[in-house]
Amino acid sequence: MAKWLLLLASFSGFTGVALGAFAAHGLRSRLPENLLNAFQTGVHYQLWHTMALIAVALLLLRFPESGLFKATGVLFALGIVLFSGSLYLLALSGVGKLGMITPLGGVTWLIAWACLALGVCRTL
């Protein structure tokens, strides 16, 4: 599981940097400020949660049987897709209803952080 999460974090980090550069150089003159800000918020949160995903993967190398750490990793990854992915789609398509998905990603991350805390309390 740790290897899978590290590979996923590598992909997320790569795409986060690439999408950030795309926003800065390719979208700045093409999107209204509010949509560009939404896109950049997606990048920002994707990269922060990519770092969290790496930390969880490293914890799993030490505690490979921790179901809570496994759940944390899955939830961080799902949150990236839901939160950041919905913001990217919203910014590029202009379809405002996609913004209804974004809070689901945020809640997923909140649950992930709670699982991490519980896992730390039970394991360390």
Image (cartoon, grey):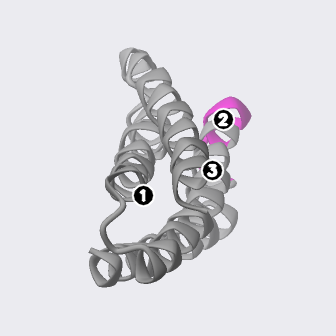
Q: Residue at x 36, y 61 (%)?
A: 66
Question: Quick one: 5 or 121, which is closer to the camera?
Answer: 121
Question: Quick one: 11 or 94, which is closer to the camera?
Answer: 11
Query: Which dot, 2 or 3, sits closer to the camera?
Result: 3
Q: Is residue 115 inside the magenta stretch?
A: no
- Alpha-carbon span between mark 2 and mark 1: 40 Å
- Label 2: element kind: loop
Q: Which residues are magenta?
A: 29-36
User: Which numbered disc flags the more N-terminal residue, 2 or 1?
Assistant: 2
Left/right placement of residue 50 relative to residue 66 reads right
On the image, the x and y values in percent for residue 75 come to 38, 46
- Alpha-carbon span between mark 1 and mark 3: 20 Å
Amino acid at dot 1 = Phe
Quadrant for the N terminus, please.
Answer: bottom left
Instruction: Provide the residue designation for mark 2.
Output: 32
Left/right placement of residue 23 relative to residue 104 reads right
- Label 3: element kind: helix
Instruction: Provide the residue designation for mark 1.
Output: 69
Instruction: Provide the residue designation for mark 3.
Output: 45
